[in-house]
Image: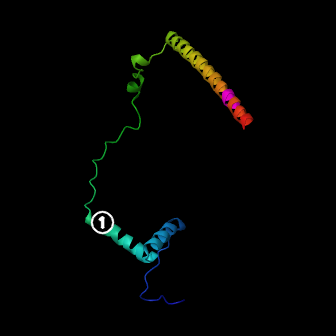
């Protein structure tokens, strides 16, 4: 068994995900990776020691695991959310009319785009013919 060398600090192993940016930063600042890492760790530990401990929020009351059955059965949707067949039919007809109007507008837009493309093609052909 080899004797452990005295006076050497233990190594810190870094993943490539951490080592690559650390190396780039060290190269840009002109210092070694170990000096940069040591400086960063000193700053982190000094700032932790200087800052007061964070205030914790009071504990929340524990919620019930099970809702009592009598309370669960009393829940009903709000009056505004109750849907009947008549309201659903009316909404369906309204949506159908809106879709038809959108389809009409889309067809008109397609026709206008087609006309613009044809006009642009005619102009290109005219410019090509004129030279």
Q: Main secondary structure of the magenta part?
A: helix
Residue 117 vs residue 4, the one in the foreground = 117
| Position of the N terminus by quadrant | bottom right
> Could you tell me which secondary element the residue under label 1 belongs to?
helix
**Place of residue 102 in the rendered image (x, y in percent of width and height, measured from the top left):** 57, 19
**Place of residue 61 in the rendered image (x, y in percent of width and height, measured from the top left):** 31, 42
Task: Please name the residue shown 51% across and 14% down the image.
Answer: 91
Task: Please name the residue shown 60% across and 23% down the image.
Answer: 109
**In this picture, is 70 found above or below 42?**
above
**In this picture, is 5 found above or below 129?**
below
- Residue 84 relative to residue 39: left or right: right
Residue 67 vs residue 4, the one in the foreground = 4
| Position of the C terminus by quadrant | top right
**Place of residue 74 in the rendered image (x, y in percent of width and height, measured from the top left):** 39, 21
Residue at the far front in the pictured view:
130
Tell me the quarter of the picture where residue 39 sits: bottom left
Q: How is the image coloured?
A: rainbow
Tell me the quarter of the picture where residue 52 sits: bottom left
**Residue 119 lies in the magenta-colored region:** yes
Which stretch is magenta? 117-121
Residue 87 vs residue 37, the one in the foreground = 37
**In this picture, is 58 found above or below 87?**
below
**Residue 55 lies in the magenta-colored region:** no
Task: Please name the residue shown 27% across and 59% down the image.
Answer: 53
Q: Which residue is mark 1?
A: 47
Residue 21 vs residue 79, the one in the foreground = 21
């Amino acid at each position: 068994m080899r004797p452990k060398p005295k006076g050497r600090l233990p190594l810190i192993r870094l993943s490539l995900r951490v080592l690559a940016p650390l190396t780039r930063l060290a190269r840009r600042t002109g210092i070694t990776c170990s000096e940069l890492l040591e400086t960063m760790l000193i700053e982190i530990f000094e700032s932790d020691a200087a800052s007061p401990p964070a205030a914790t929020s009071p504990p929340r009351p524990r919620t019930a695991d099970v809702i009592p059955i009598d309370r669960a059965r009393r829940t009903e949707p709000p009056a505004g959310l109750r849907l009947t067949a008549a309201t659903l039919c009316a909404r369906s007809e309204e949506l159908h009319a809106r879709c038809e109007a959108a389809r009409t507008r889309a067809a008109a837009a397609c026709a206008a785009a087609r006309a613009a493309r044809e006009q642009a093609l005619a102009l290109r052909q005219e410019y090509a013919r004129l030279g």
